[in-house]
Amino acid sequence: MPSRNPIDWMWAEACQLLDEAERLQRQFFRLDYPRGARVAWQPPVDVFEDEREFVVVVALPGVSPGNVEAKIDGRTLLIRAQRRVSLQDRHCSIERLEIPHGYFERRLVLPRIRAELESQQWSDGCLVLTIRKVR
């Protein structure tokens, strides 16, 4: 029998709505689970290439630059960190939660060339990685 306490049923409904929001989020963000990692989402990326380098732009709204790990492992570019929910320390109700949060990891396979991560910069909520082609 459902509880008559309004706090109990409101809490249960909020949890159900969060579960539904996560289900919908998984429909829109491709999820991978490499090597057993518990990846919650993958940020979208743009990749540009010229004869000298690749430039990878990773959309990371609300992610602190100091918490992001970006490295090249063999032929794979790995980008990972965690995005916390904004205002999570405030006592407020969540009206809408659309920006992905939680642990993320993005892996991009590079072509069969030697490459080195040359620089990491932040611009308008995006991580911009420059990857130099080594001849």
Image (tube, grey):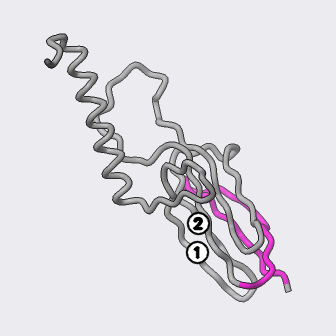
Q: Is residue 83 left or right of residue 28?
A: right
Q: Residue furthest right?
A: 135
Of mark 1 and mark 2, the one earlier in the sequence is 1
Q: Which residue is mark 2?
A: 57
Q: Residue furthest front?
A: 1
Q: Is residue 103 left or right of residue 75?
A: left
Q: Magenta segment: does it hold 119?
A: yes
Quadrant of the frame with the N terminus: top left
Three-letter code for the amino acid on which mark 2 is drawn: Val
The answer to whether the residue labelled 1 contacts the one labelled 2, judged by CB atoms less than 8 Å apart, is: yes
Magenta stretch, main secondary structure class:
strand
Q: Which mark is residue 47?
A: 1
Q: Residue at x 36, y 60 (%)?
A: 28
Q: Where is residue 119 shown, x and y percent of the image?
A: 76, 63
Q: Quadrant of residue 3?
A: top left
Image: 6 above or below 84: above
Q: Which residues are magenta?
A: 112-134
Quadrant of the frame with the C terminus: bottom right
Q: Nearer the viewer, residue 114 or 58?
A: 114
Secondary structure of the residue carrying tag 2 is: strand
